[in-house]
Image: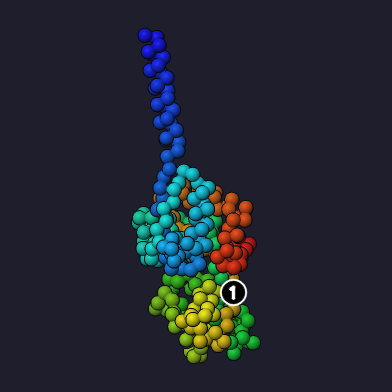
């Protein structure tokens, strides 16, 4: 009888141990959205796989968080923003800039995931007179209108507040972006167009690009590096904190810099220092 009791006790202890181990190793699956077209930040490659700089960083973050398993979902801008807001996705990434309006809707972590370079596109014939935003303001300040909801509007607005004696003519446009900005500047309708360096490279400088005929007519002048962030659903503060712990390690050990060079050809993360 004593042996039977001991046997039962050992079995119970074993089952308790297995149960505790299963509980300890239970992994929470996390739905992560990213845009499916924004090369080289976030996109779907020719093999149908999630790819890009920010995607690669997120995959490295996942490796450092054994309690989570990230499931990547390529999608559109609107689905990402609405999906994260409504909880369809726990978080998403798409080269996002931080704004006060977005801070009201999402949780932003303490650390950005990368950066993008913002600047102005001018006519090459004016490059001897326009070398930065203050000289552009002196030249004319005539800027292609920017949609008020566009984070680029905020960047220029902040510049104007910091430079009251060299202000750019900031006009809120009807659209989020001005797809005809290159044309308008080239025609002289405006004298500069706010653009991201990567967009200028892909739309103007790249062989066969939509506006490659303007390659010698337009010049890009960088202004500053802007941090890009993942956005988290309001209920995912704990996950955002875990992301912060992981990204800090990846920055410290050079992983983020290595991936930036791999995807951009330069260490864009250095712009944030």
On-image quarter of the N terminus: top left
Q: Quadrant of residue 269?
A: bottom right
Residue 137: x %, y % from top left: 58, 82
Tally of numbered tags: 1
Q: How is the image coloured?
A: rainbow
Query: Label 1 neighbourhood size at 10 Å, few (<14), some (14-19), many (20+)?
Result: some
**Residue 46, quarter of picture:** bottom left
Q: Secondary structure at mark 1?
A: strand
**Residue nearest the viewer, comparing 226 with 6:** 6
Q: Is residue 107 left or right of residue 216?
A: left
Q: Which residue is nearer to you in this view: 155 or 89?
A: 89
**Is 69 left, or right, of 217 in this rendering?**
left
Q: Residue at x 57, y 60 (%)?
A: 259
In the image, residue 161 sits, relative to residue 260, either above or below, namely below
Q: Is residue 75 left or right of residue 189?
A: left
Q: Position of residue 8 (x, y in %)?
A: 38, 17
Task: Locate residue 147, reporting x and y percent.
Answer: 43, 75
Q: Residue furthest top?
A: 1
Splitting the image into 4 quarters, where does residue 106 fall? bottom left
Is 99 or 43 nearer to us in this picture?
Answer: 43
Residue at horizontal 45 percent and vertical 36 percent from the top = 24
Q: Is any atom of residue 151 visible in this view?
A: yes
Residue at image location 37% in from the left, 13% down from the top: 4
Which quarter of the rendered picture does the C terminus lie within?
Answer: bottom right
Image coordinates for residue 14, horizontal then vertical, percent: 42, 25
- Residue drawn at x 52%, y 80% is 207
Residue occupied by mark 1: 223
Q: Is residue 236 among the parts visible in the rendering?
A: no
């Amino acid at each position: 009888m004593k042996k039977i009791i001991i046997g039962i006790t050992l079995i119970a202890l074993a089952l308790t141990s297995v149960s505790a181990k299963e509980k300890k190793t239970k992994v929470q699956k996390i739905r992560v959205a990213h845009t499916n077209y924004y090369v080289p930040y976030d996109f779907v490659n020719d093999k149908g796989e999630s790819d890009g700089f920010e995607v690669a960083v997120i995959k490295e973050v996942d490796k450092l968080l054994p309690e989570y398993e990230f499931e990547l979902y390529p999608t559109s801008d609107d689905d990402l923003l609405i999906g994260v807001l409504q909880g369809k996705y726990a978080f998403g990434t798409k080269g996002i800039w931080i704004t006060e309006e977005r801070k009201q809707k999402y949780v932003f972590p303490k650390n950005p995931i990368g950066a993008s370079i913002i600047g102005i596109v001018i006519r090459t014939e004016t490059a001897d007179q326009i070398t930065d935003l203050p000289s552009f303001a002196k030249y004319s300040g005539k800027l292609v209108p920017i949609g008020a909801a566009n984070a680029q509007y905020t960047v220029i607005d902040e510049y104007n507040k910091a430079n009251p004696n060299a202000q750019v003519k900031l006009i809120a446009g009807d659209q989020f972006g001005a797809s005809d900005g290159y044309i308008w500047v080239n025609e002289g309708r405006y004298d500069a167009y706010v653009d991201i360096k990567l967009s200028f490279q892909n739309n103007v400088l790249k062989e066969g690009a939509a506006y490659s005929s303007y390659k010698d007519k337009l010049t890009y002048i960088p202004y500053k590096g802007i941090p890009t962030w993942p956005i988290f659903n309001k209920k995912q503060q704990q996950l955002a904190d875990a992301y912060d712990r992981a990204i800090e390690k990846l920055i410290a050990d050079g992983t983020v810099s290595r991936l930036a060079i791999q995807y951009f050809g330069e260490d864009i993360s250095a712009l944030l220092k």
